[in-house]
Amino acid sequence: MRKKILISIFVILFLILVAGGGFFWWQRRGIKGSPTDYVIKETAEGKIVENKRAGLTVKVPEGWIEKKIELFEGSVIFDTPEIEGRMEDNMVKPPLKRGCGMESAVVYKKFDLDELKGEIKEIHAGLGIKSEEFEIITINGRQALKNTFDSKFIGPGMAIYFFNKNKLYSFAVYWAPDEKEKCIQGFNKFLETVSIK
């Protein structure tokens, strides 16, 4: 009888440990996005890009060309029709010779400001950064990190990062040498259409 009680207690403790470990794993698991999370829709107001999983909706700038990137967690690029640059993976990549390019992506990871700056600097270290600035800004009532840079390998650009719960939303713009003003103007209008829920 005593042996059955000890075995029962051992089994119950074992199940509690397994259940507790499973619960801990469930809480710590990484959520990953997918290129299929992005849907491009034609609406009465124009084309929009929606990522319901991330709670993100943006309007495609009028006259720009949008394309889903089917890599990693996915992203969407937006290019002006006259864009010229280095062709790679069936898309134009910076540095640009002509036109403007933008990218929108979501990273399912919680960052604090210093951690994000460190990650950006680490990525930029391999890009031959000539200049780089960080600034805290507010767009549509949301605090964001703005990073303006110039690189030997990808040219000039700017990225805006919004934090929301356990997600990081990034929006970047790249421009040809003589088209900075036009591209930043288009980027600012684009940012006005960003909706994060």
Image (cartoon, rainbow, N blue to C red):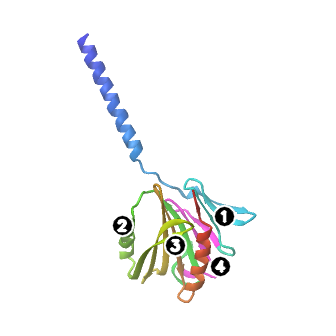
Q: Looking at the picture, how far across and down is residue 182, in whole percent?
A: 60, 84
Q: Looking at the picture, how far across and down is residue 115, in whole percent?
A: 36, 64
The numbered mark, 3 or 4, whose residue comes first in the sequence reads 4
At a point 72% along the width and 63% down the height, the residue shown is 42
| Distance from the alpha carbon under mark 3 to that under mark 1 | 17 Å
| Distance from the alpha carbon under mark 1 to that under mark 4 | 17 Å
Crowding near pointer 2: few (<14 within 10 Å), some, many (20+)? Answer: few
The numbered mark, 3 or 1, whose residue comes first in the sequence reads 1
Residue 75's label in the rendered image is none
* Magenta stretch, main secondary structure class: strand
The span picked out in magenta is 65-89
Q: Which residue is mark 4?
A: 81
Q: Tag 2's secondary structure?
A: helix
Q: Looking at the picture, how far across and down is residue 103, in whole percent?
A: 54, 70
Q: Which residue is mark 1?
A: 48
Q: Is residue 174 visible?
A: yes
The answer to whether residue 70 is magenta is: yes
Amino acid marked by disc 2: Asp
Q: Tag 4's secondary structure?
A: loop
The answer to whether residue 75 is magenta is: yes
The image shows residue 188, relative to residue 50, as above or below, that is below
Amino acid marked by disc 4: Pro
At a point 37% along the width and 73% down the height, the residue shown is 121
Q: Which residue is mark 2?
A: 114
Amino acid marked by disc 3: Ala
Amino acid marked by disc 1: Ile
Q: Residue furthest left?
A: 2
Mark 4–mark 2 CB contact (< 8 Å): no
